[in-house]
């Protein structure tokens, strides 16, 4: 049976205290959240009617807000209720659920300084989105190491999720110009960091490694570390040299929007047989099997949408 589309079918949003269909959600053009990228955010996934690691995402969101000195009126429990209601209003079983805290503007008469701005929460639920198209999932992503370096962590700490994406966007144009799907950015010392919207694992001789610093401490990365431990695969969180990336047997891209994704080429070099490798397959299958069994799951409160 197909459901009749409603204004909510495309998604539901919450903006500064009000719920609305996604198509009606708009932020003021003068907001510093927009004008200065003065905003932080997080994204949590919903699969088969349940959030994955909801508490961890809201905890990280709070830590990001504190890092940028942002404070919306809602506490963590209120934020979770907003997220449940967005998914419920949109009637989604599989969703991409975002939470943002914007700086706002200082009210009239207050000093023109971010300390006086009225911060507010925005959130929305959309039908599930994956970073990687099905055909790329099938053949493995083609990666390039970009010339562009990641913004230094002392300037913008990547552990606080942010939209200072000029480096990642510039890197994506480099990837595009070189016929690849995604860039990987290095830090000023030549260590591997991350890519546009994902963390990385390199695999060599059956051992996994992921960068320890200069990256978002991704929750999919955390899940892969837990999973590798359960499967008896050695995994290290440490500095990763660019040479390791270029010589890897496999490279995995991991993110909420897609889970665990394979790469098959790096800077034009083919890894394995130009297809997703065995470590990817094992982790990917175990990840989705455990997800189906309710791993780190919080069922969506669909009654909150009525
Ligand atoms: N790194 C960056 C820059 C990201 O934007 C993201 C997700 O959006 C990730 C890593 C992966 O984090 P998570 O697994 O928590 O989604």
Image (cartoon, rainbow, N blue to C red):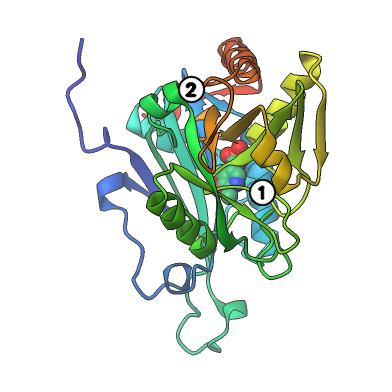
User: In screen coordinates, is 214 left or right of 31?
Assistant: right
Quarter occupied by the N terminus: top left
Establish if 40 lies above or below 48: below
What x and y, as percent, mark residue 30? 37, 76
Between discs 2 and 1, the one toward the N terminus: 2
CB at mark 1 closer than 8 A to ligand 1? yes
Residue occupying image coordinates x 40% and y 31%: 128
User: In screen coordinates, is 252 left or right of 87?
Assistant: right
Question: Which residue occupies the foreground of this view, 82 or 122?
Answer: 122
**Residue behind mark 2:** 47
**Camera-side mark, 2 or 1:** 1
For residue 72, say whether it is visible: no
Point out the quarter of the image occupied by ligand 1. Answer: top right
What x and y, as percent, mark residue 282? 64, 13
Under circle 2, the secondary element is: strand
Under circle 1, the secondary element is: loop
Count of marks overlaid on the render: 2
């Amino acid at each position: 049976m197909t459901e009749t589309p409603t204004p909510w079918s495309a998604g539901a949003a919450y903006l500064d205290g009000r719920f609305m269909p996604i198509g009606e959600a708009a932020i003021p053009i003068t907001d510093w959240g927009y004008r200065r990228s003065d905003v932080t955010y997080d994204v949590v996934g919903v699969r088969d009617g349940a959030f994955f690691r909801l508490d961890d995402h809201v905890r990280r969101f709070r830590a990001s807000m504190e890092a940028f000195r942002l404070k919306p009126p809602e506490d963590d429990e209120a934020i979770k209720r907003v997220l449940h209601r967005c998914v419920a209003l949109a009637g989604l079983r599989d969703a991409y659920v975002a939470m943002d805290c914007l700086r706002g503007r200082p009210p009239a008469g207050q000093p023109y300084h971010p300390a006086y701005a009225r911060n507010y929460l925005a959130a929305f639920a959309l039908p599930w989105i994956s970073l990687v198209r099905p055909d790329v999932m099938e053949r493995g992503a083609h990666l390039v190491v970009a010339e562009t370096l990641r913004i230094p962590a002392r300037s913008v700490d990547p552990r606080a999720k942010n939209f200072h994406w000029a480096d990642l966007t510039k890197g994506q144009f480099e990837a595009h110009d070189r016929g690849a799907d995604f860039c990987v950015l290095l830090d000023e010392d030549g260590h591997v960091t991350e890519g546009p919207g994902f963390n990385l694992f390199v695999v060599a001789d059956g051992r996994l490694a992921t960068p320890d610093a200069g990256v978002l401490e991704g929750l999919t990365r955390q899940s892969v570390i837990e999973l590798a431990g359960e499967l008896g695969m050695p995994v290290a969180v440490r500095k990763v040299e660019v040479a390791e990336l270029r010589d890897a047997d496999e490279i995995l891209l991991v993110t909420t929007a897609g889970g665990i994704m394979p790469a098959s080429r790096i800077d034009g070099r083919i890894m394995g047989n130009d297809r997703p490798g065995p470590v990817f397959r094992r982790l990917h299958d175990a990840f989705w099997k455990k997800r189906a069994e309710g791993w780190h799951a919080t069922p969506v409160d669909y009654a909150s949408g009525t």
